[in-house]
Image (spheres, rainbow, N blue to C red):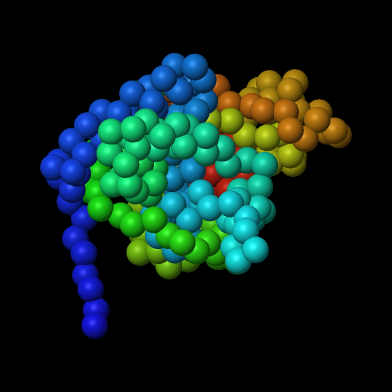
Amino acid sequence: MQCHAQLSSTFYDRTCPNALTTIRTTIRQAISSERRMAASLIRLHFHDCFVQGCDASLLLDETPTIVSEKTALPNLGSVRGFGIIEDAKREVEKTCPGIVSCADILAVAARDASSLVGGPSWTVKLGRRDSTTASHTLAETDLPGPFDPLSRLISGFANKGLSTRDMVALSGSHSIGQAQCFLFRDRIYSNGTDIDAGFASTRRRQCPQEDQNGNLAPLDLVTPNQLDNNYFKNLRQRKGLLSNQIKFF
């Protein structure tokens, strides 16, 4: 027998009416302490959703029966914000134990993170159930990589029901956040025609040709802590930091 459920923005109105306010308070505090956390929470939600749906499977730790998605290459050492979601869950549990799923908390946290740094807000439909399994394999194969060719990016998003237009719009989330040196080193030392020379020179100061792979650089130099459309303006000026970003223009 099949069972179908419908998500609803009012899912917790009776069972946990203060859930959204509680989550937002936790997210606001986290972003006030570290502005970068907004980007991290949005990315955390995206990496969860791109692997077997928005089910919080990315939050599952390694166990004898689970190979965690956290250790997949696209997540290892870069996906962060787990502790913030745990904080939000802990606060919600104080008033509504066993009611609100981690998957819903993560979805709401991403929305709140966006709006708190000047980005869009939206109504989050609720009622997700948390996964009891993870897929390390799908995390390795399905998540878009920083060096993927455009054809692979387009097909990867299409496999999730997302158009090329959707993909480009979602890439705008790179208006905030930071990248590690090894992800953009080849681009800034390429002397290519697709990168502004002054921009490349500025970026080289914090990313030498050798070593210091983990040095961080803001994806957007103009408004690095604001979710806006400068990402797209930067691309048109040949000032995209990551190599696969320039393929959109």
Residue placed at 32% from the left, 42% from the top?
A: 97
Give the farthest residue toward the top.
32
- Residue 130: in sight, yes or no? yes
Q: Is residue 232 above or below residue 136?
A: above
Question: Hey, which quadrant is residue 213 in on the image?
Answer: top right
Residue 28 horizontal side relative to residue 191, left or right: left
Residue 119 horizontal side relative to residue 211, left or right: left
Give the farthest residue toward the right.
210
Question: Hey, which quadrant is residue 138 in on the image?
Answer: bottom right
Q: Position of residue 129 (x, y in %)?
A: 33, 57
Residue placed at 38% from the left, 22% from the top?
A: 28
Question: Hey, which quadrant is residue 4 in on the image?
Answer: bottom left
- Residue 175: in sight, yes or no? no
Residue 152 horizontal side relative to residue 198, left or right: left
Q: Position of residue 51 (x, y in %)?
A: 48, 60
Residue placed at 52% from the left, 62% from the top?
A: 134
Residue 151 horizontal side relative to residue 25, left or right: right
Q: Position of residue 31 (x, y in %)?
A: 44, 22
Residue placed at 45% from the left, 31% from the top?
A: 87
